[in-house]
Amino acid sequence: MHKRSFTYLIGTQSMSNAADVLYIMALISLIFHGTDSIITAILIPLLRMGTQMISGFFAPLLLVRFQLPLILFISQMGQLLLFAILIFHLWMTGPSGGWTIVFILVIALSFLDGWTTPARNSLVPRLAPGAALMKANSLISVSDQTVQLAGWGLSGVLVAVLGAEKTLLLAGVLYAVALVFTALIRDPLETDGRYWLHPLTRVRQEEEPEKADSPPTDSVNSGKAERWKTMQEGWRLIAASGRLKLLMFIDMVDMLGGSVWVGAFTLAFAQEVLHKGEAWWGYINAAYFAGAIGGGLLVLACTRLLEKRLFGSMVAGMFGYGILTAFYALNESAALTLLIVLLMGPPAELSIVSRRTLIQKSVGDADLPKVLSAQAVLMNLMFCISLLLMGWIAERFGIVNLYLFAAALTGLAAVIGLLCRRIFRDHAVSGIH
């Protein structure tokens, strides 16, 4: 494992994620108090998710042209500059207006952020090849969940104590620290430090002078066709691989119920089923992230055992998570609810880490960024659909049936995996990894 660059990768991701949480909470607070409109405040997370989906669709154009550390650096630098503009704009306009500019800047920030997930997940197998891959994925998952637990738990307190404006300044400092970590990351597969271009791009550019004497053709149309082909490449790779198609389909079915842990649904469950106030909404969220951290650490401790049974671990994790979600829906004891949510962590992390590792092992290093870009688009789209579908189910059939439906979707994803496990067994025999 290339420990130094991997440590910097975790550092930049942790700082950036923490900054995202702080600035979203601060902005929602500012917008809600400035407009007195819940719908306007909800636009922030919706705009982020929709923009990241669009960004993921165009990401392959960058991922095949530039080295991955440069893409991360450009993304972080751009986000820092845009965030500085956002803070300056809010300082000039105050709490009274200018929200259109704020939304435009949020869209721009989210577009840049949409490159980071496929670039980061593509770097992980390069920094932690072979047997170290599942351990690396577990470490990243623990880091992400820890930041989420601390961020969402403390951000409300920080906004209340410091105020939204100072909280935004703190987020800006975290973005700056993330940029420093990003600048120190090195890709071991791209060892020539003199270049920031992807090696294949350099080869094409070196070949172009030899073709300069030939008569020009329809280069504009050719360039557009090449870019379109690049954007489609990840989708073609998924369509051509039985393993990837199965993993993506399982991911989509599971993600369809993935939005049930959004704050609005857990708050409704606390009030309508547990008959508790907003404090218990916070307790449920804290227990969920604490369970995820504990689950990630457990998976990390068992990586040597689990890496030989990745597919079975993924299916077992989904079954366990689905069963616990059903118990959560049918339970009316507040204390038992916290225990159930805490116990969800290990099977959830087992499923997530195993699935991510399987995807990374199902495609070569050169093609992985394209596949992960397509996956990011799919997952963001499914999450948006999930929000709309789960909201309708909650309104139409009640919050208990909402969680039962989510549990059924996870169970369905696990059953699909069991029925199609032959695909992985056949590929393992043929030597495809």
Image: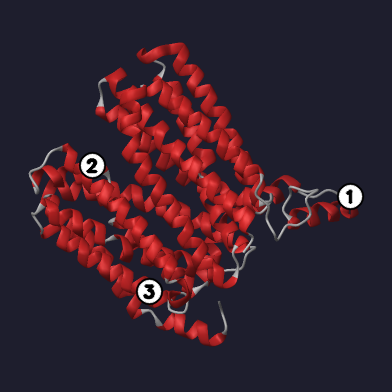
Name the residue that disc number 3 marks: 313
Q: Residues within 10 Å of mark 2 (few under 14, many from 20)?
A: some
Q: Nearer the viewer, residue 161 or 183?
A: 161
Amino acid tagged 2: Gly
* Numbered badge on residue 293: none
The answer to whether 298 is drawn above or below residue 389 in the figure is below
Amino acid tagged 3: Ser
Name the residue that disc number 2 marks: 282
Amino acid tagged 1: Ala
Who's the residue at 21% across and 61% down the image?
A: 325
Who's the residue at 48% across and 85% down the image?
A: 426
Residue contact at pointers 1 and 2, CB within 8 angstroms: no
Q: Nearer the viewer, mark 3 or mark 1?
A: 3
Specify whether 176 is left or right of 190: left
Residue 75: x and y in percent read: 58, 40
Who's the residue at 31% across and 66% down the image?
A: 347
Residue 423: x and y in percent read: 44, 80
Specify whether 394 is left or right of 100: left
